[in-house]
Amino acid sequence: MSQTDTSNIQALSTEMSQLRQELQIRDQLVQQLSQELFRLVKGNNNFMPQRSELEQDFTQLQALREQLQAVEQQVTFYQEQIASRDTEIYQLRQSVQELTDRSRMLEQVVQELPQIYRRKFEERMAPVREKVAILQRENRQLQAELQSVSYRLALKTRTSSHSGIDLPNFPRPASPQDGMPSVQNA
């Protein structure tokens, strides 16, 4: 223990002893005053309040009780109002939270919509592109055959006297795949 701690302890113990002495003196004074007051009240009949003063005090006390009861009723009413408002606030906060969550979800859906539409469009366009490619191939084949027939026809008309036209036989597909009608020779 250091010297400062020892000096602090001594100072505190001295102060405590002084406070105890003051407390004892006060206790004695209180006791003396209470005895003196008792003697004064016991011996003095005028000290007791008059009956009319008691009735006034009682009337005032009754009025104060009624006011207190009215105030308590108001407090109860306001507490009920506060409780109902708190419930309403809680419900509103929940609905705000739900709406906020829904709004976020909808925003996400709106952001994803262009990608979804592109994907759906691509899915729908794939069969159309296949059909267009098939038609283009058939078109090129038909154009090549048409040029061949035109060339042969031109040669025949030059060499013959327009006796008859020889038309080529087009190959018929085994089964129509794309719902395209097959070309038939007449």
Image (spheres, grey):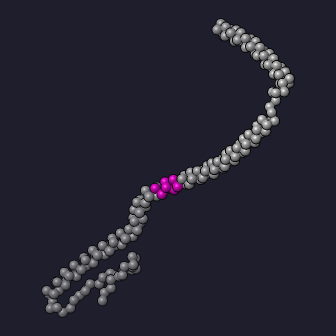
Q: Nearer the viewer, residue 85 or 186?
A: 85
Q: Quadrant of residue 60?
A: top right
Front position in the image: 174 or 109: 109
Q: Position of residue 176 (x, y in %)?
A: 39, 79
- Which SS does the magenta portion mostly show? helix
Answer whether residue 104 is magenta in the image: yes
Tell me if residue 179 comes above or below residue 106 in the rendering.
Answer: below
Numbered-mark total: 0
| Closer to the camera in the image, 63 or 173 | 63
Quadrant of the rendered structure where residue 57 is? Answer: top right
- Image quarter hosting the C terminus: bottom left
Residue nearest the viewer, comparing 142 with 97? 97
* Residue drawn 44% across the image and 58% down it: 110
Residue at 16% of width from left, 87% of height from top? 157
Instruction: List x then y, in percent, for residue 19.
Output: 73, 14
Task: Give the quadrant of residue 164.
Answer: bottom left
Position of residue 99 in the picture relative to residue 160 (left or right): right
In the figure, 26 relative to 160: above or below? above
Residue 105 in magenta? yes
Which residue extends farthest right?
43
Q: Position of residue 181 (x, y in %)?
A: 36, 81
Q: Residue at x 76, y 41 (%)?
A: 59
First to last magenta residue range? 99-107
Is 99 on the left-hand or right-hand side of 185? right
Say which residue appears at 84% left-offset and 24% top-offset. 44
